[in-house]
Amino acid sequence: MSPPAPRARRGAPDWLVIARREFLERVRTAWFIAVTLLGPIAMVGLIVVPAVLAATSGADDVRVQIVDHTDRLGEPIATGLQLQGWKAEVVPRDTTEAVLLGRIRDEAIDGFLTIPASVLDEDPARRGDVTYQGDNATSQMVVMRLAGTVNAAVLTSRFVGIVPDERLPAMIAPVGFEPRHTTGETSGTSGTAVFLIGYAVMIVLYMAIVLYAVNVLRSVVQEKTNRVVEIMVAAAKPRALMLGKILGVGAVGLVQVGVWAAMGVLSMTYRAELLGVFGVEAGAWSVPPIGLDVVAVVLAYFLLGYFFYAALYAAIGAMVSSEQEAQQAQTPVILLLIVPMMCMQLITNDPRGTAAEVLTLIPFSAPILMPMRYVLDGATATSVAISLVLLALSTWLAAWLAARIYRVGILMYGKRPSLRELGRWIRYG
Amino acid sequence: MTAGGPAAGPASTGDFAVRVAGVTKRYGNHVAVDGVSFEVPTGVIYGVLGPNGAGKSTTLRMINDIIAPDAGEIRLLGGLRPGREAAAHVGFLPEERGLYPKMRVSEMIAFMGELRGLPARDARTRTGAWLERLGLGQWARNKVQDLSKGMQQKVQFAATMIHEPELVILDEPWSGLDPINADVLRDVVREQKAAGRTILFSTHLMEQAEQICDHICIIARGKKVLDGRLADVKRAAADEGRVALGFVDAAARARAEADGGPLADRALVAARHAGRGGLDAATDVEVELAAGADGGRLLAALVAAGAGLRRFEIVTPTLHQIFVDKVGVENASVAARADGAPEGGRP
């Protein structure tokens, strides 16, 4: 009698069944919903809170005293500071430093200015510095206002008698200064904003890859400790197991990052309104438009980068038999992820330089650094294409190796394989 | 054959359910399975028996393509290769039980069904039926981790059977079950057989095997010791000629065993074994008939000698006795000591 034909599969393919299970198990947890929704709130917080803090705290209601050895600058500075809402007064010049420090200790004042007589010396080489000592000397706003007021007073005193009084304020008014980022194609957008977006893209990709690829590792190890792996391997090929796991966890990541990205873009677009709620002005920089090409590049590198690292992590998961062991075994891969982060400055300082070119070609660092470089307009379409091809090839290789290690390693409990055994697994699998 | 709906039962799959031919598996220097061959006919309950570490689990793993044999060939259901080809036709309960602890009970079972190729809707309907059959209906929406060990084991049975495989393979299915659930499982296995399916299981519990098996295969130290229909194995053992004798008192026994007595006749009795199977050591004895002798001649001789017989019985040995005889006392006692410990054999 002839053997029966293999029964045609009527349901979904095994890798899809596995991927769906992995996806649903994660998406249904309260933890996932909390992180997905609270993540953007944290992101909004990161934009709003520093702005609110910088704008409101520290720079108002400051109490300073002025020790003036020139007899000319003390009063104009005090007046200038009072106009900004500060409490400023000139104290007798024989007030000792010890007494003033005591007042800071007693919180009678926040700090004091000492203006040496030499400040007005005509020879720049012999000019002394105005010093400020105070408990708020670390605040950028306080220092900026003090320096501005003191400089205005010094300039005014220099011009007295040379320039007519009514023209003085106009003469000493500073000019505005605005950095704009450009590589020559467009007239440029706010340099700060471009940097921030590039930086955000890198952080999000790094976090997403680490979070979800490590998730794959933990999932593999947990299946071993639960012993579920045995019925799974009997029912599906290890390759389908690995593929399903990576796809399922990856889909979770895609959903989460998608939600975050959407909320991030929204919060950047309505930044002024958001900040307005807190009574803060948005500042002068404009948000550069995020083109579809940027979205495509970020997505491509997220997917390939995730697959690349997830395959590496899956292989590690197949090699170890406990979470503790996994912690140790994943160190080399973590290093591969952290080193590109350290090299971030090489990209931001010179997005079109050789270092940036090389770093964005290496498959280990390309997923994290190339999207940032692209946002900074440092990468041509050609270099993106070459880098993507290299990354895709490495991903395929990593998946191939991982599948072989997975096939043999997934049923191993107990001791970790040596490098030689690993080689045998790869040949055998 | 046709794919067959769930109600159609297993399709006809040729003349054997499992054929294992000269299969060997080595781990380093250790030979876990050494040239084992046996054939499981379609539609029977087949027990692979052996002490712990004999190679039972390794054999079942190879049949399920979890590991590959180093030599030999395995074919399932009339000719399918283990693994992908056969996956939809086979259900496997591994020795290492494991479920996803955070999944709901019903979803876990349906998931396993889908993994074996069942469409999602069929998987859901059948899951409900299985949960009712195993008395787990009220737990369907609980998470697996909320269930007791015994209940989890039943969930695992359901997950093994959900796709209604023609061939059900169970590795030590009774370990960890209380007597009531052991009975439930035995009933389920018999139902599966009645539905035309083949059940292949391993165990070291001879009592369970004796109650349920049609065929057995005894494995020890990686080698097959014997196989065949349980009834044939038992008849063969009975034909080996053991007779249990009971005398009215110790003196009558001593007369029969004395020189010139019927039990001392080498043409009739090859050996005497005292006190086996709960016999009274003073008055009872079990004897092994000599080659060419039979029970009738021994009885005639005893009656002729006026031996004062109370009992005369041709012994049909229990499976346990056959097992001990065939596997050897040292192996069987290893089995007894290692009872309940997981089977070794992997590096």
Image: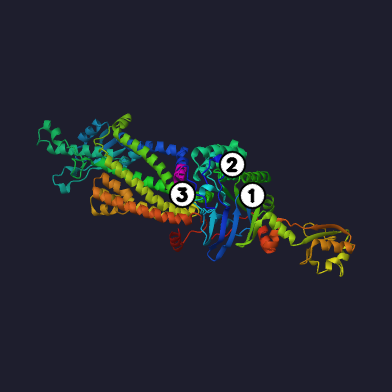
- Which three-letter amino acid code belongs to the residue tagged 2? Leu
The image quadrant of residue B242 is bottom right
Left or right of residue B269, residue A407 in this image: left
- Is residue A158 left or right of B110 when viewed as pictured? left
| Circle 2 crowding by C-alpha within 10 Å: few under 14, some 14–19, many from 20 | some
Q: Nearer the viewer, residue A343 or B305?
A: B305
A379 on left or right of A8: left
Chain under disc 2: B
Tell which of B169 and A48 is nearer to you: B169
Q: CA distance from mark 3 to mark 2?
A: 26 Å
Q: Residue at x 40, y 51 (%)?
A: A311
Q: CA distance from mark 2 to mark 1?
A: 18 Å
| Residue that carries the numbered disc 1 in the rendered image | B174
* Image height of A25 relative to B65, above or below: above
Amino acid type indicated by mark 1: Trp
Query: In what element is the residue under mark 1?
Result: loop
How has the structure been colored for display? rainbow
**Residue A387 percent location from the top left of the image:** 29, 51
What is the x, y in percent for residue A54?
Answer: 31, 37
Front tag of 2 and 1: 1
Identified by mark 3, the residue type is Leu
Q: CA distance from mark 1 to mark 3?
A: 29 Å
| Numbered range of the magenta stretch | A12-21
Judged by depth in the image, the label closer to the viewer, 3 or 2, is 3
**In this figure, which residue is indicated by the disc labeled 3?**
A241
Q: Which mark is residue B196?
A: none
**Taking B333 as reference, is A75 above or below it?**
above
Residue drawn at x 47%, y 48% as measured from the top left = A219
**Viewer-nearest residue: B123 or A59:** B123
